[in-house]
Amino acid sequence: MKNIQDLKGCGTALVTPFSSDGKIDETAFRNFVDFQIREGINFLVPCGTTGESVTMSQAEHLRVVEIVLEQSAGKVPVIAGAGGYNTAHVIDMAKEVAGLGVDAILSVTPYYNKPTQEGLFQHYKAIAEAVQIPIIVYNVPTRTSTNILPDTVVRLSEIENIVGLKAASGNIGQISEMAMKMPENFIMLSGDDVNTIPIISLGGRGVISVVSNLVPKMMVKLIDLCLKSNYKKAIEHQRTFFKLMKVIFLETNPIPVKAGLAMMELIEANYRLPLVPMSEQNRETLKSVMIDIGVI
């Protein structure tokens, strides 16, 4: 990608297919990346929450990114996850990922150790000073128990290579405040499928999506309508698959989305502990919704 400021649209937070022995299923993964590109996805995001990155070794993490880069072959931008609660380790990972040639990194706020707002600022500042690659901050308090506040994001936006925010706080008031305070060139992306329309209406550029693993073409169309400010048609379109947006969070992500992809015969529904297969009752609910909207 020539300029990260051109980033917009729908990016898929890619699942990582595993084989029954727990190893990365490289063949299925390559085929899945091909599927995403054929369906018109705008960019790809490997090694995030949906990719079960916390269960992968550093070598596996880098291999997943390599596969996406090889298979996408420059057709779409690649933004790779590189985050965690140990700043030194995150810097090491960010350097390794940057060396592979990704367009940017997505770095989640530190989890478990619950830093202060100053700690969050210093964490991202240290990463930004260690690498030249663009950094997108990822705020998802329901996962991390840490909420990066608007004024902290404003401070971070003043650092040259901190270029954007994946906003998944679920707090539209907070996201609105961020949108009002951010520089115009700061990239805001929705991190919640169901909140994408309001976030784009506040100036967001698109979404890093979970549901687009299953229905990339439908999600790309939704974002395109929003970016053209055709919100009436966007809402009508979202109604056609809104139930799917909801049902894929019946259990912890990515349990349901992997189950759905297995129903589509794109991957096998294999997980790494502590994640386990979807309950039969919830799986039937998911299957029913997927049938209703014509996905299977």
Image (tube, rainbow, N blue to C red):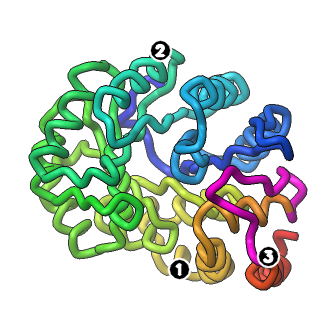
Q: Main secondary structure of the magenta part?
A: loop
Please tell me which residue is depicted at 47% across the width and 71% down the height of the picture.
230
Q: CA distance from mark 1 to mark 2?
A: 41 Å
Q: Amino acid at mark 1?
A: Ile
> Which is in the foreground here, disc 3 or disc 2?
2
Q: Give the x, y percent position of residue 272.
A: 68, 50
Q: Is residue 267 above or below residue 104?
A: below
Q: Which residue is mark 1?
A: 235
Q: Secondary structure at mark 2?
A: helix
Q: CA distance from mark 3 to mark 2?
A: 39 Å
Question: Is residue 34 something one can see in this rendering?
Answer: no
For the residue carrying disc 1, how many other residues have a C-alpha within 10 Å: few (<14), some (14-19), or many (20+)? some
Q: Is residue 117 above or below residue 21?
A: below
In screen coordinates, is 265 left or right of 223? right
Q: Give the x, y percent position of residue 107.
A: 37, 41
Please tell me which residue is depicted at 59% across the width and 78% down the height of the picture.
246
**Which mark identifies residue 99?**
2
Q: Is residue 74 above or below residue 227?
A: above
Report the magenta residues as a range. Answer: 263-279
For the residue carrying disc 2, how many other residues have a C-alpha within 10 Å: few (<14), some (14-19), or many (20+)? few
Please tell me which residue is depicted at 46% across the width and 18% down the height of the picture.
96
Q: Give the x, y percent position of residue 68.
A: 66, 31
In screen coordinates, is 122 left or right of 138? left
Q: Amino acid at mark 3?
A: Met
Q: Give the x, y percent position of residue 280.
A: 81, 79
For the residue carrying disc 3, how many other residues have a C-alpha within 10 Å: few (<14), some (14-19), or many (20+)? many
Is 270 magenta? The answer is: yes
Q: Secondary structure at mark 1?
A: helix
